[in-house]
Structures are given as structure tokens and as C-alpha cells.
Amino acid sequence: MKQRLAWGGTRSLARAGLCLLALAVTLGKPTALRGEAGSELQDGTKALYTGQYQQARMLASRYLQAHPQDASAHILLARAEIALGQYQPAYEALRKAWELNPSNLDALYYLERLSNLLSQMEFRQLLETSPDSFRAHQLLAESYLARNDRENAEKEYQAAGKANPKSVEILDALGDLMRSEYKFNEAQDYYARAAKLSPRDYASAYGAGACYLFQHNPQRAIEDFQRAVAINPDSATARLALGDGLLRVDRTEAGIAELQAAIRLNPDIRQAYTLLAHAYQKLGQTREAQQALAKDRELAREEARGAEAENADESASPAKPQ
């Protein structure tokens, strides 16, 4: 059966490649470099901008023979390879640039764009060679979900489940999807099936607990969250959820212990401080409650500043090419 590509198929893939080519040869300006080595790299960049991609690749490769630790040269080589449609060598050059300089924004940017294109190519190959495989249906489901098309995502997850009825991963995905739509009974059924196949499955344990907590059944939720914590003691999310459940059944001190454990694992988990403030207040520990509330408000301010900065960056950024 021929599958329709959720991300737009061959046209989308070709468009992505053309956009990446355009960006590879136009984005950014040559960095001001000094000396003969700088002149050589600038010549390579000029060749790239004027469409002499083979020349740009040759100059970058020759420079790297003498300067293998130069991240900018690896990026120039990668841009030339992209322009020539040689995506795998480009990826390897960008990975090397990133390893040499993990904070290099150009390396990170091109890695993200190229990785997206390569993943689409692998996606297309999988759908063409094994269109009815459970992985093909899973990838289609995930692509639909990324577009918030939950109806088609569910259909593809169901198809994946039929192709591989013993996939715990698919059962958990269906459980998560049902839980996000507040269909808790259906979600719990999927989580139960996953747990039966894999008793040490964290996702089904946590998911089932979250369902019971939403259904105002904290005691059952506690049992599942305890199982999730036993499976993954380093999960701040599970510790937070367990602490929340314990507070709801008036096991305040036990709840505080779990919330403190969550904070040790993730000091910026704001909800833990919110719950701690209420728990300490309930115990009459006013100073501790005020400290937790102060931290809660501090994190809230940081979140607000981060959101403002992100909105400002989006407003200042040029429109992305289609």
C-alpha cells in the first residue's frame, strides 16, 4: 500500500534541499581573516558565493590538510558539499566543526537544517521500501502529531500496533495520545497492556499514574508513581508527581520528601516549589513556606523574561524561506 508522506512528499523534500542550497551559498559574510591562510579561506567563500562549488570544496579541503583543527574551514567544506548535493560528507564536516567548537552558531544551524533534510530522506526511503512496516506507520504518526493532526496520528499508531502488537513503544504512544485528549480510560488500557508486556516500562507506569491523578484518584496514582520512581529513581518528573499525590492524601511529610528529591534532580522545577509552599504552610512552617514561595516567584520571573526574549527574537528574525 502506497503511503502519503505527511510532510509533503517528494516536492517537500526537493524544496527543503533547494532551501538548504540557497542558505549554504548566501547565509552570512566571510569572516575577516588575516594572512595567507585567511586569504585562502576567503577565496573559498568567494568561490562558493559565485557558484564555483567544486573550487570552494577544493580550497577548503586543501586548507584543512594543513589546518585540520579549524572549525570555520570545516563549515566552508560542508557548505560546498551541500551545494553539490553531497549531504553525508557535509554532515560529517559539520559534526567535526561542532566537535572542535560546540558553541559555533553556524555549525549548529547547518547541523539542524541538514539533519532535518537527512531524516526526511531516510523517512522517504523507509516508506518506499517498507510502507506497511510498523516503523513506517510510527514515523507517519509522529509526523502527523508534530502538525497537531491527532486524528491521523491515531490512525497511524493503530496501524503500527496491528503491524507489531507487542510494541510497548506504540502502546505507550497511544496511551499518551489518549491521555492528552482526556480519554483516561482508553489511555489506561494501553498503559496496562504495555506494562503487561514490560513490567519495568517507565512510560506506562508514569502515564497510568497521571491518568489516575487527573481522575482524582490519588491513592491509585501513588501506586503507579511509586512504580515509576522504582524504575527510574532519577526522574524529577516522577518524583514531583509522587509528591503531589502524597500531598493529596495528607501524607504531607512524605510528599515534601519527594518534592525535595525532585528539586535536587532539577533545581528549576517550579511546580515543586509551589507545592512545597502549600505543604510547609499546612505544617505551620512559615519560614520554609516563604522561602519556597520566593523561589517559585523567582522562577516565574525568569520564565517571563525568557518568553519575552524569545518573542523578541522571533519578531526580529526574517521570514523563513518556504
Image (tube, grey):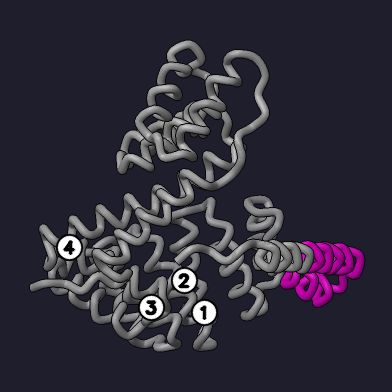
- The residue that label 1 is drawn on is 219
Q: Residue at x 36, y 87 (%)?
A: 185
Label 1 sits on what residue type? Gln
- The residue that label 2 is drawn on is 223
Q: Secondary structure at mark 2?
A: helix
Q: Secondary structure at mark 3?
A: helix
Q: Secondary structure at mark 1?
A: helix
Label 4 sits on what residue type? Leu
Horizontal arrangement in the rendering, residue 172 relative to residue 223 (left or right): left
- The residue that label 3 is drawn on is 177
- Residue 12, given in percent of the width and then of the height, sits at 32, 65
Label 2 sits on what residue type? Glu
- The residue that label 4 is drawn on is 127
Q: Quadrant of the N terminus?
A: bottom left
Indicate yes or no whether the magenta region holds residue 107.
no
Indicate yes or no whether the magenta region holds residue 300.
yes
- Residue 58, given in percent of the width and then of the height, sits at 38, 23
